[in-house]
Image (cartoon, grey):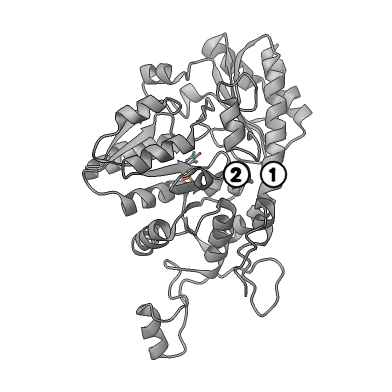
Amino acid sequence: MSDDFDPDWGTATRGVRAGTHRTPEGEHSGAIYMTSSFVFESADEAAARFAGEAPGNIYSRFTNPTVDAFSKRLAAMEGGECCVATASGMSAILATCLATLESGDHIVAAHTLFGSTIGLFNNYLGKLGITTSYVAPDDLDAWRAAITPATRMLFVETPSNPLTEVVDMGALADLANDNDALLVVDNCFCTPALQRPLDFGAHVVVHSATKFLDGQGRALGGAVIGDADIVGDRVFRFLRTCGPTMSPFNAWIFHKALETLEVRMRAHSAAGQRVAEWLADQPAVEHVYYPGLASHPQHELAARQQPGGFGGILSLRLAGGREAAFRLINATNMISITANLGDTRTTIVHPASTTHARISAEERARAGITDGVVRVAVGLENVEDIIADLEPGLA
Ligand SMILES: *Cc1c(COP(=O)(O)O)cnc(C)c1O
């Protein structure tokens, strides 16, 4: 059995080779351990394992070899010391917050976060006396101004959803360090194939493995990556006690999916770039939001932070408002109309009436998510077919 990887390996090689857990059977593809508990040779061994004096598995809420193989592989790809796998992306964020924050603590977060993350912060952490302030993701002065003596966490997604605003992670990491706070980055849109937030000073990376890590729309999962003292100790202990652990079956799916992550993300990025450039040439399109376009206000920063590529997610704004947006979406034939993203299949959605419908109209206006905005998550179909499917609705 080997959990080793060569530190000189690139991200693709790590995705294929790191976190390999091979049994004496010599299986080439990773085995799956569907078991809730593990047996001991003797009462003495059981006692030693429970006391933490002997290594080994006890119960799959604590550790499981399949989940461990996935965690080690993802940690290697993100360049992190430790990774713990969770039941979903939301439980990764919940575990990170409950393991590191206390009542009275304060979070500063980007106002463009995934809707359920805002719900978790406002409704559930709020109830525990953990408060959150929201700022424009790309306005460093706003982040600085929102910090209070109680601030212990900065939380961001970059690029943002749906307008692909890019956050300067190095600057936010400095701000976090100056204020005894953790910078937590939700790296769901980029994955380590495109961007490694820990390289820019982020303290913790969280993932919804449900999205690009699987990339095939099959299973729910999440992960938290960072240093041993935060993730290996605090987050792991929360998970072991409170229970939102990843199922071994889902871990087996994600472990395999990581082998193709780099090549998939490269394909998503190439197609995203092509669709963005095509959209920018369409007279009906007022604006295209995509970090790979030279017209994007943070194009250079995105190129520096995302050496692997600009990703497959873009938005466009139509002059005709909601009516034009609905016409474009309804004129598609092949593309899936769904709020989900990070799939082999291209998806299209109207953020103002779906993913961002719960925030107030004023807040949406402030964030620039107007009624004419449509988000496209570009999949792995032939890019000509994606463009051909968008064309009728823009005519
Ligand atoms: C989907 C998503 C989540 C939540 O993940 P689940 O696996 O659905 O719980 C968190 N953050 C972002 C950016 C997402 O897109």
Judging depth in this view, the residue of 237 and 210 nearest the camera is 237
Q: Which residue is mark 1?
A: 264
Does mark 2's beta carbon lie closer than 8 Å to ligand 1? no
Determine which quarter of the picture holds residue 136. Answer: top left
In percent of the image, x 63 and y 64: which residue is there? 5
- Asked if residue 191 shows in the view, the reply is yes
- Amino acid type of disc 1? Arg
Q: Is residue 325 left or right of residue 133?
A: right
Between the C-alphas of marks 2 and 1, the distance is 9 Å
Q: Quadrant of the C terminus?
A: top right
For marks 2 and 1, the one nearer the N-term is 2
Which residue in the structure is indicated by mark 2? 212
Quadrant in the rendering for residue 358: top left
Q: Quadrant of the N terminus?
A: bottom right
| Spot occupied by residue 362 in the image (x, y as percentages of width and height) | 37, 16
Residue 387 location in percent, x, y?
A: 73, 24
The reply to whether the C-beta atoms of the residues labelled 2 and 1 are less than 8 Å apart is yes
